[in-house]
Image (spheres, coloured by chain):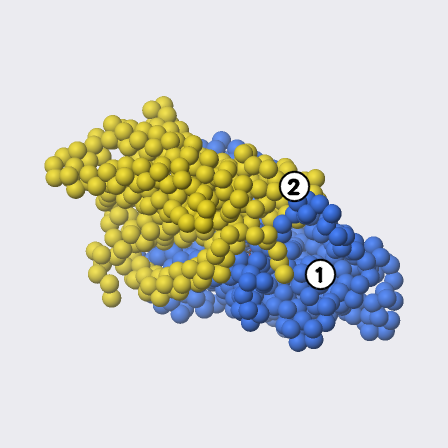
């Protein structure tokens, strides 16, 4: 296989694995701060129980996020040397600021947050918790600035094929940055909301019916119900922004080949790139035009506009973008129905009154946020092809000259490690949830009590 | 704002400093992992507790070092990292195994604890060996041949031994009782490994690189450099003497082996840095040829000068908070 494809698969595998864990830690940090502040305020034991359970999940996710993130930072050099050579003058400072203002902050205060509760005064522990949450959000900010700049570059100039920074303000607040940041932070919040609701529902089903579990369930559902409308709104605005800056991506998301008005919203289709048409199309007439142009007759760009004179294709692969977008939006709609339905049921009958199917449904959606987040990133990133930095640098120009066999063998090694780790992670999460339900036994053999 | 000629030098120094900090700080917690085969489960819990609050931040110095290479020397980083593709991958997988095993061993069901301990050890070993291997290939000018791989195998072993030694020093410093006594024994064995490793690498380096040979053995350099090996020899002697008396009854000087190991590493590092200067890709590219645009470097430097002291400040705070002998780790 060729080196470009292998390197792309390897990068996609590594970042997909990486993003799973930041998606949890970014929002979970703030949720832990909330639990802690509630406990400080009410002195109600259940908040402490919630904190002590979820802080374990946080610590585990954080470790996975850190080690996979380190892999990411080496990837630029090992697989994409052209990236830094061309846009290093912009990407460099952004990455440097991420390390300086975010990574050290998180890493140092994480130690104090996790293990320092009995060693430092209460306020310092709360402050450490805050700084960890703040640090994860800062790192999301910086990396999304860079990622957004790669989608909608601004504030730079090109001299002899190398990018130089001209206006840092324009670089940082590039056109898609605010949308992507908001959308990603909300995605993180939703992932955590459904994780908490789902694991709590699972514990409830296993007859682990303590006040902490009931509160966790109510908290997760309420958070989800609050965030999902915001997310749908943010997603819509994000799409409009993309229409302005990366029309080819939106055309692929909509599966729209011809530039025209009255574009239908496709619920199902099999885009066929060879024939340049959709097969088995099912759609609602004119709705895509309404969403994108707020007018049924609104003209929406089509994929055929992005074919060069000589016939070479300048738009991203259609099926992958089309379907990953539908998966994300589909999960979003499901989240809307489930969270609002759940909150409505709880208001009417209380947590005790939740029917078993509803509980199983929630438990089944524990990791729905992961699904939507990955699908969203695939939409965004595959939709940028063939560009690495839109209009500046293609992926092909950036790839490193490494033996394909080497990339393949390391790729296989990564995949094996990642598969094992995800299995272990899920296993341990449910193990912790099951263990939390058992009444604490007195430690008979202290040496067998693992240190946390 | 900054002198354009000075910037690359400043960044080379910053990168060197963060590599040095990484090697010392992550060195001790990797070393703790390397010592796992010689321990009982209770001892492993205690050793893990001694590094628990620190390892994550320690590792961040590697991220900073690689980040600085990436951002300050964009044209060099590709050459270096593509040449080191395989050992980098081994190191990354090692770091992954070690980092996650740390969490999993405490949270997985109790029967799974042993396999995670093995993963912790294996990850530490992969990391230490691959880092040493990369150092060797780097010294050899990023060439892959039978001779360079043989040399790199030597440096790989030497670095793993050095990490184990500093790890043992850390355990002496942070624990007491039987475990501390055990660590003194490890260190007594380890110090000979360190002497052997440092000696072999120092002997092989000038032989392998004519340029470094000239840099070391011409006058007046050879006189100016003489303090490095002399100080190292003195330090090794002091370490040996102290290890024979440790542990003392009132635990005085328990810190000495660790600090001695740190100083040894610093000496070794300066010897190495001196040999390479002014190259960033050995024999091919100097730090000035590889540096990024002045504007971008200035922007980073401003931030670095403001933030780095703060980082150092709260790093020290963490070591102060968790001072004293390691006890059980817990979240409440
Ligand atoms: C700082 C830069 C950056 C950031 C924050 C992200 N990406 Fe990305 N992504 C790239 C920089 C990049 C890249 C270097 O530009 C790649 C490598 C090859 C390519 O096509 O673009 C890429 C490709 C790429 C691909 C393969 C697309 C293809 O080749 O067809 C996927 C699936 C993802 N990314 C997924 C993600 C996910 C899940 C992210 C969430 C964290 C993410 N990306 C953030
Ligand atoms: C190519 C892109 C990326 C690179 C190179 C990268 C790099 C890294 C590195 C090196 C770490 C470890 C830092 C440490 O030692 O503490 C890390 C952790 C982290 N990253 Fe990324 N990252 C990328 C994408 C992202 C994205 C898109 C997000 C968020 C939207 C993100 C959010 C985080 C967070 C929150 C952490 C802290 C650790 C955790 O919470 O698990 N990263 N990343
Ligand atoms: C239901 C309505 C939603 C709409 C209309 C929507 C819209 C969008 C659009 C248009 C993009 C592509 C942005 C680009 O062009 O680069 C995107 C990306 C993304 N979406 Fe959604 N989204 C929705 C729901 C969700 C949900 C529920 C999640 C996760 C819980 C999510 C997570 C993401 C992520 C992580 C990305 C990639 C990062 C980014 O570009 O912002 N989305 N979304």
Neighbour tally class for label 1: few under 14, some 14-19, many 20 plus, Cα within 10 Å: many
- Give the quarter of the image for residue B196: top left
Q: Which residue is mark 1?
A: A196
Depth order, front residue of B187/A357: B187
Q: Is label 2 on the same chain as label 1?
A: no
Horizontal and vertical percent for residue A288? 66, 65
Residue B40 visible within the image:
yes
Q: Which residue is mark 2?
A: B113
Horizontal and vertical percent for residue B234? 27, 39
Horizontal and vertical percent for residue A383? 55, 54
Tell me what residue is drawn at x 55 percent, y 71 percent: A123
Horizontal and vertical percent for residue A2? 49, 35
Tell me what residue is drawn at x 63 percent, y 44 percent: B105
Tag 2 and tag 1, C-beta contact below 8 Å: no
Residue B93 visible within the image:
no
Chain of the residue under the numbered disc 1 shown in the image: A
Label 1 SS: helix
Chain of the residue under the numbered disc 2 shown in the image: B
Tell me what residue is drawn at x 35 percent, y 66 percent: B306
Neighbour tally class for label 2: few under 14, some 14-19, many 20 plus, Cα within 10 Å: some
**Distance Cα–Cα, label 2 vs label 1:** 26 Å
Q: Which one of the lettered chains is coloured yellow?
A: B
- Give the quarter of the image for residue A328: bottom right
């Amino acid at each position: 296989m060729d080196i470009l494809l292998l390197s792309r698969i390897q990068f996609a595998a590594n970042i997909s694995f990486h993003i799973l864990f930041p998606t949890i830690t970014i929002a979970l940090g703030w949720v832990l701060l909330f639990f802690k502040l509630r406990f400080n305020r009410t002195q109600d034991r259940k908040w402490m129980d919630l904190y002590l359970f979820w802080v374990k999940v946080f610590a585990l996710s954080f470790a996975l996020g850190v080690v996979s993130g380190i892999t990411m930072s080496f990837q630029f050099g090992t697989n994409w040397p052209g990236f830094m050579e061309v846009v290093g003058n912009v990407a460099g400072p952004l990455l440097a600021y991420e390390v300086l203002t975010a990574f050290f902050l998180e890493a140092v205060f994480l130690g104090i947050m996790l293990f320092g509760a009995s060693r430092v005064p209460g306020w310092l522990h709360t402050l450490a918790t805050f700084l960890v949450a703040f640090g994860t959000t800062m790192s999301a900010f910086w990396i999304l600035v860079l990622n957004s700049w790669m989608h909608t570059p601004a504030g730079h100039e090109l001299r002899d094929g190398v990018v130089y920074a001209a206006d840092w303000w324009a670089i940082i607040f590039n056109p898609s940055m605010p949308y992507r940041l908001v959308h990603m932070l909300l995605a993180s919040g939703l992932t955590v909301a459904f994780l908490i609701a789902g694991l709590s529902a699972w514990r409830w089903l296993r007859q682990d019916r303590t006040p902490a579990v009931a509160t966790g369930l109510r908290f997760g559902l309420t958070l989800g119900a609050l965030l999902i409308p915001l997310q749908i709104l943010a997603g819509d605005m994000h799409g409009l922004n993309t229409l302005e800056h990366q029309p080819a991506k939106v055309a692929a998301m909509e599966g729209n080949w011809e530039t025209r008005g009255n574009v239908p919203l496709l619920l199902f289709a099999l885009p066929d790139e060879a024939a340049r048409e959709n097969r088995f199309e099912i759609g609602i007439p004119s709705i895509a035009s309404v969403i994108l142009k707020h007018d049924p007759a609104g003209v929406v760009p089509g994929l055929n506009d992005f074919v060069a004179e000589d016939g070479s294709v300048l738009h991203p692969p259609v099926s992958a973008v089309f379907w990953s977008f539908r998966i994300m939006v589909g999960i979003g709609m499901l989240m809307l129905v489930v969270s609002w339905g759940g909150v409505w049921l709880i208001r009417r009958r209380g947590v005790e009154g939740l029917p078993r199917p509803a509980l199983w449904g929630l438990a089944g959606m524990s990791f729905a946020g992961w699904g939507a987040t990955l699908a969203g990133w695939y939409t965004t990133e595959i939709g940028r092809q063939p560009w690495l930095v839109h209009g500046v640098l293609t992926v092909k120009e950036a790839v490193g000259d490494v033996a394909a066999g080497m990339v393949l063998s390391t790729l296989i090694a990564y995949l094996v490690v990642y598969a094992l780790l995800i299995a272990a992670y899920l296993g341990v999460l449910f193990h912790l949830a099951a263990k939390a339900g058992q009444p604490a036994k007195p430690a008979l053999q202290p040496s067998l009590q693992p240190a946390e | 704002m900054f002198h354009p000629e000075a910037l690359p030098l400043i960044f080379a120094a910053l990168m060197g400093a963060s590599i040095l900090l990484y090697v010392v700080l992550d060195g001790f917690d990797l070393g703790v992992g390397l010592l796992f085969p010689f321990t009982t489960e209770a001892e492993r819990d205690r050793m893990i507790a001694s590094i628990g609050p620190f390892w994550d931040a320690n590792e961040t110095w590697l991220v900073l070092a690689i980040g600085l290479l990436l951002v300050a020397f964009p044209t060099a980083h590709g050459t270096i990292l593509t040449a080191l593709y395989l050992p980098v991958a081994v190191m990354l997988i090692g770091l992954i195994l070690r980092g996650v095993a740390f969490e999993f061993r405490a949270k997985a069901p109790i029967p799974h604890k042993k396999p995670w301990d093995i993963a912790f050890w294996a990850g530490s070993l992969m990391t230490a060996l691959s880092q040493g291997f990369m150092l060797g290939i780097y010294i050899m000018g990023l060439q892959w041949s039978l001779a360079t791989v043989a040399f790199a195998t030597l440096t790989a072993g030497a670095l793993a031994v050095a990490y184990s030694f500093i790890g043992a020093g850390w355990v002496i410093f942070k624990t007491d009782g039987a475990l501390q006594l055990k660590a003194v024994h490890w260190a007594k064995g380890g110090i000979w490994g360190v002497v052997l490793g440092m000696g072999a690498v120092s002997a092989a380096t000038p032989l392998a690189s004519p340029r470094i040979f000239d840099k070391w053995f011409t006058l007046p350099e050879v006189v100016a450099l003489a303090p490095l090996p002399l100080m190292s020899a003195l330090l090794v002697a002091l370490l040996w003497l102290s290890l024979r008396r440790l542990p003392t009854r009132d635990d005085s000087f328990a810190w000495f082996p660790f600090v001695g190991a740190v100083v040894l590493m610093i000496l070794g590092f300066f010897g190495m840095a001196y040999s390479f200067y002014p190259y960033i890709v050995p024999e091919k590219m100097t730090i000035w040829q590889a540096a990024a645009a002045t504007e971008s470097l200035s922007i980073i430097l401003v931030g670095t000068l403001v933030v780095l002291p703060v980082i150092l400040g709260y790093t020290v705070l963490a070591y102060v908070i968790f001072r004293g002998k390691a006890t059980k780790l817990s979240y409440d």
